Image (cartoon, rainbow, N blue to C red):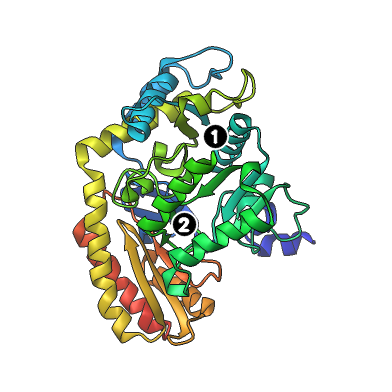
Amino acid sequence: MSSQQKLSVSPRTQHVSSGVAVAHPITVSRAAGAYLWDDQGKKYLDFVGGIGVLNVGHNHPRVVEAVRKQLETFSHICFQVAAYDQYTDLAAKLNNLVGGPEHYKSVFLTTGAEAVENAIKIARAHTNRPGVIAFRGGFHGRTLMGMTLTGMSQPYRQNFGPYAPDIYHTPYPNEYRGITTEKALAALQEVFDTQCAADRVAAIIIEPVQGDGGFIQAPVEFMRALRKKTEALGIVLICDEIQTGFGRTGKMFGFEHSGIQPDLVTVAKSLAGGLPISGVVGRAAIMDAPQPGGLGGTYGGNPLGCAAALEVIKIFESENLTERSRAIGAQLLEGFKPLEGRFKGIGHVRATGAMAAVEFVTDRETKEPDAATAQRVIDAAREEGLLLIKCGVYRNVVRFICPLVISEQDVAEALGMFERALVAAKA
């Protein structure tokens, strides 16, 4: 490329791998609460939140202060070198939030994919079995194990194989697409009968509400049947709460909607208000299966992330953010319903707490996915000042992931922007 050509392309195109997709052609200069501003000074309502990372909003003052105080003490130790209270205090908090009166333990890592990888390791160590069952449409990360578990071929798998062995996929219940609880349970039994016998399965991993798969909630009866089946067969049930966790669904964790108790839970994203930390929280007997040295990571449970996460938990308690999540979801769904009646391109609207989505189709009878309209709506919304992103196996679902600290007025404003985007996109 000539020097003149280099000058004509953006720094992102010039210096960053094209394998990293960017949803919006803007460059951010600052952010606060539910808003961010680009380098041209334009203000946006942020309904992406770092892809579900900022449930307490951008730069929450209490999180900023907690990190500042920690930074003045020490920024990194590595827990495998020497322990520090921030790690153990956070573990105690999460063990109580997830396990309640039961004895749970935690390990902290850096990314969601790393949490998933370690949950699989822990389950295999506990059961001494190799097999793992995941669900079609699920997303569990971009590492070798993560993308193998992920139930979508594009854009995540591409030509990156061969993939991790002993991973099997089964349909996720989706009433809108005709996959009932009964059909999903029958399909799971078929995996046991034809691909991996139940006594060779270490774990089943499930998102209580699929995130990148389309914001689809598993029915209560399915989650309860799955819990009953895994208990009977000695299979570790892993709930991937990386996107559903920390109030996004209207409860602290998505599994709480069905009243079940998982064996292991993976957490990340909104755990620390924007700082990179993840974890696995689970029953003590299962968490202690790996021998010393089998778990860890240089940056896992970084003190800054732990300090931020401890403050995030306090914010949830003091600001009643799970209750706020339910109110946001109700307001969004109430706003979606009349739009669903007006715009033929909308096939389905749904919300579990503030985990809300609109699915676009070319025909409501056939339910043929319409990714092109979804993208036009996202682009038109950006012009209005509203940032959204897509999801779903067919990339035809627009998801709404606003901070839980957002005001009722801002949600109403976002719905108005969305309506104008639908008109502009000819949905």
> Does the rendering let one see residue 171?
no
> Does the rendering let one see residue 350?
yes
Q: Is residue 176 above or below residue 293?
A: below
What x and y, as percent, mark residue 255?
38, 47
Pick the front one: 424 or 311: 311
Q: How far, Cα to Cα, is label 1 from label 2? A: 19 Å
Amino acid at dot 1: Thr
What x and y, as percent, mark residue 393?
55, 67
Determine whether the residue tagged by mark 1 lies in a helix, strand or loop.
loop
Circle 2 residues within 10 Å: few <14, some 14–19, many ≥20: many
Badge count: 2
Circle 1 residues within 10 Å: few <14, some 14–19, many ≥20: many
Where does label 1 land, which residue? Answer: 110
What x and y, as percent, mark residue 274?
43, 41
Pick the front one: 184 or 367: 184
Pick the front one: 306 or 232: 232
Of tags 1 and 2, which is closer to the observer? 2
Q: Which mark is residue 211?
A: 2
Do the CB atoms of the residues marked 1 and 2 lie less than 8 Å apart? no
